Image (cartoon, rainbow, N blue to C red):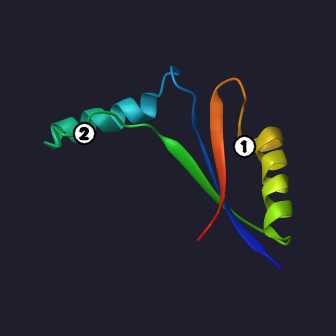
Amino acid sequence: MTTEIEIQVGLKSGMADPEGVNVKKALDLLGFDSVKKVDSVKCYRIIIDKNEAEAIKESEEICKKLLANPVVHEYSISVAK
């Protein structure tokens, strides 16, 4: 059985997000005045050859060891639909 996992990694609240700030400025210049804030987030889709529970557990290890720095990042893991 394979499970498709979606992992989103973003900066913790209060961390500087220059990419988000630049996108927000560009949106303002394009006239999208209703956009109040932009946060940049990376999304990873990983197919793991395990059942859902084991795949989520392995995804936690992947985040801790590679995808997220616990000092500056937060992440979420879900089964992709």
* Marking on residue 54: none
Amino acid type, label 2: Val
Q: Earlier in the sequence, mark 2 or mark 1?
A: 2
Q: Residue at x 49, y 22 (%)?
A: 16
Amino acid type, label 1: Leu
User: Image check: 41 left or right of 4?
Assistant: left
In terms of image quadrants, where is residue 20? top left
- Mark closer to the observer (2, 1): 2
Kindly state the secondary structure of the residue where label 2 is placed: loop
**Closest to the observer: 10 or 22?**
10
Q: Looking at the picture, how far across and down is residue 37, in whole percent?
A: 33, 33
**Closest to the observer: 31 or 52?**
52
Q: Looking at the picture, how far across and down is residue 12, in whole percent?
A: 57, 28
Q: Looking at the picture, how far across and down is residue 13, in whole percent?
A: 52, 25
* Marking on residue 35: 2
Dot 1, how many residues are within 10 Å of its Cα: few (below 14), some (14-19), or many (20+)?
A: some
Q: Residue at x 72, y 31 (%)?
A: 69
Q: Looking at the picture, how far across and down is residue 79, in whole percent?
A: 67, 64
Dot 2, how many residues are within 10 Å of its Cα: few (below 14), some (14-19), or many (20+)?
A: few
Vertically, is 67 above or below 36?
below
Q: Residue at x 86, y 70 (%)?
A: 50
User: Image check: 16 left or right of 59?
Assistant: left
Quarter holding the N terminus is bottom right
- On the image, numbered disc 1 is attached to which residue? 67
